[in-house]
Image (spheres, rainbow, N blue to C red):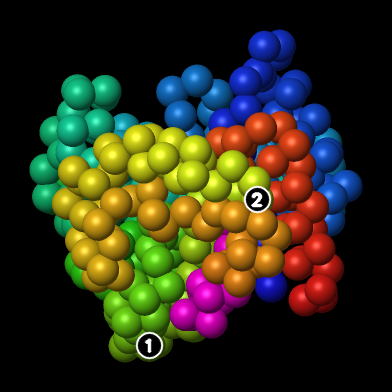
Amino acid sequence: MSLGIALPAGDDHPGNLVTELLDQVQEAAAAGIGAVWFAQRQDVDAMTLAALAGQAVPGIRTGTGVVPVYPRHPITLAAQARTAQAASAGRFRLGLGLSSKSFVEESFGVPFDRPIRHLREYLTVLGGLLREGAADFAGETLRARTVFGPVSVAGAEAPPVLVAAMGPQALRATGELADGTVPFLAAPRALADYVVPTIGAAAQAAGRPAPRVVAMVPALVTADTDAVRQRAREQFAFYEGIPSYRAILDRAGVERAGDVMAIGDEETVAAELRRHIEAGATELIASQTGMGTAEDRRRTWRLLGELSAGSS
């Protein structure tokens, strides 16, 4: 079972946040966890953290889970991705997402028009930049031209591109133009019946390899199950009003987003993580591991390390 964690995990960070996150990467590696994925929030930059972690902790795999494509231009993003790939010695995965209309328009002041067309054009341009380092593209939502030479960083091959796609059109675009998907809050039933077959069929039709399905699963080993479940329902309630998340929850027959979180003792959490693998996930990212106490997080990370070691 290939397992990673998402950072920030939710813990309080009274000191230098970047330093503390890099210390947590070291702690995760010592626990046997092989991958860390950085969430793009409006404080620290996920791409920068991935590059720093790749340099600071030899052997750790890094990724972004996920960077919104609005408002970053693919030329800028390609340069950042190649830099992170070089810093990580080829162990970086680029996770992208469309985000949501309300977030994009309210935060960035840019229109969230024709998002699937924009995703297709973005992935087309980004793929060319990562493979050949060049772009000369004029589409309906995007223009890109490398007028100052190629986007190239010595020592950096093209990293895998994964998209947080859950709607049917986004999944098809991802299967055709990217390397895989990073679904969040997709319970095993939704993975097996919908996500995996939809993206797999699109990739096969496009003549691409079988896509990666890197499922991000909220998980916490804790004795305070009821309190953590209630906290998860409160914190994840936001997603229930976003159409793509509401649809993925409905496909699994889940009413409350917080009920997707794997919560309980080591045996309970491990069984739930295995269900995601059995449903077709090729890799898992445990998120929200800091929702409980510091000891809960440490127990969760120990379990993840043990599960990783048991599958190697």
Q: Is residue 87 left or right of residue 146?
A: right
Report whether residue 262 is seen: yes
Residue 147, relative to residue 138: is it above or below?
Answer: above
Q: Name the residue beneath numbered marker 1.
A: 204
Callout 2, which amino acid?
Val
- Image location (x, y in percent) of residue 58: 86, 47
**Mark nearer the N terminus (1 vs 2):** 1
Residue 285: x percent and y percent? Answer: 58, 56
Q: Residue at x 29, y 40 (%)?
A: 237
Give the magenta-colored segment's residue range. Answer: 274-285
Q: Quadrant of residue 291?
A: top right
Q: Residue at x 60, y 55 (%)?
A: 264
Front-most of residues 299 and 48: 299
Q: Which mark is residue 32?
A: none
Q: Quadrant of the C terminus?
A: bottom right
Mark number displayed over residue 221: 2
Which amino acid type is marked by label 1?
Gln
Secondary structure beneath dot 1 equals helix
Residue 246: x and y in percent read 21, 55
Q: Position of residue 212 (x, y in %)?
A: 51, 72
Residue occupying image coordinates x 35% and y 67%: 174
